Amino acid sequence: MSIEEIEKEIIEEFELFGDDWEGKYEHLIDLGKSLPIIKEDLKTDDRIIKGCQSRVWLNSELIDGKMVYTADADAIITKGMVAVLVRVLSNQKPEDVVKADLKFIEVIGLKEHLSPTRANGLVSMINKMKTDALSLCR
C-alpha cells in the first residue's frame, strides 16, 4: 500500500469516532499495542528521539529497498503516536518517506488535540524518521 492509501485508512478509522476525542485517544492507545516493538538490545541512547517528553526509541533499517521502522515508548499515548507513524512510513521507499506530507495528522485533528510537548514530540518523531530515510536514499 502507498503512504496515501494508509493515510486514507487511518482517516476513515478516526472518522468513526466523530468528535469523541476520548474514543480517538483510546483508538490511538490500541494502535500502540500493535506497534512493531524495537528489540531490547536496540533500546540504546542513540536511538532515543530527542525532543520527546517521553522516552521514544526508534530503529530504522533499509530492507529490500524499503524503510522498516520498529519503535517503543514509555508512555501509552506516545506509543500510539509512533505506532501510527510506523504504520504509515514503514515498508515504503526512503524517497517516499522523505517526500510524505502526512496530511492525515491534520485531517484527524491529532496535533491540535495534543499538549504542546506531545505535539513537539510528534514533530520530532517525523523529523527523525525522515532524516533516517534521507540518509539511506541512494
Image (cartoon, grey):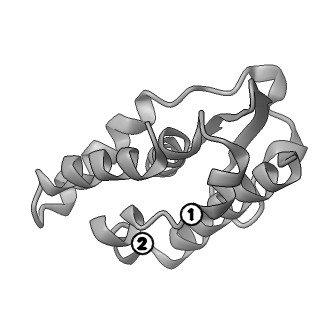
As drawn, the label of residue 122 is 1
Going 75% across and 32% down the picture, which residue do you hit? Answer: 65
- Toward the viewer: 11 or 46? 11
Mark 2 secondary-structure assignment:
helix
**Residue 65 as seen in the image, left or right of residue 16:** right
Q: Is residue 102 above or below residue 97?
A: below
Q: Is residue 52 visible?
A: no
Label 2, on which residue? 111
Sequence-earlier tag: 2 or 1 = 2
Instruction: Look at 75% across and 22% down and name the residue there.
Output: 40
Q: Nearer the viewer, residue 98 or 80?
A: 98
What amino acid is found at the position of numbered circle 1 in the picture?
Leu
Vertically, is 100 above or below 3? below
- Distance Cα–Cα, label 2 vs label 1: 8 Å
Q: Position of residue 8 (x, y in %)?
A: 30, 52
Question: Mark 2 near mark 1, Cβ–Cβ under 8 Å?
Answer: yes
Q: Which kind of residue does numbered mark 2 sit on?
A: Lys
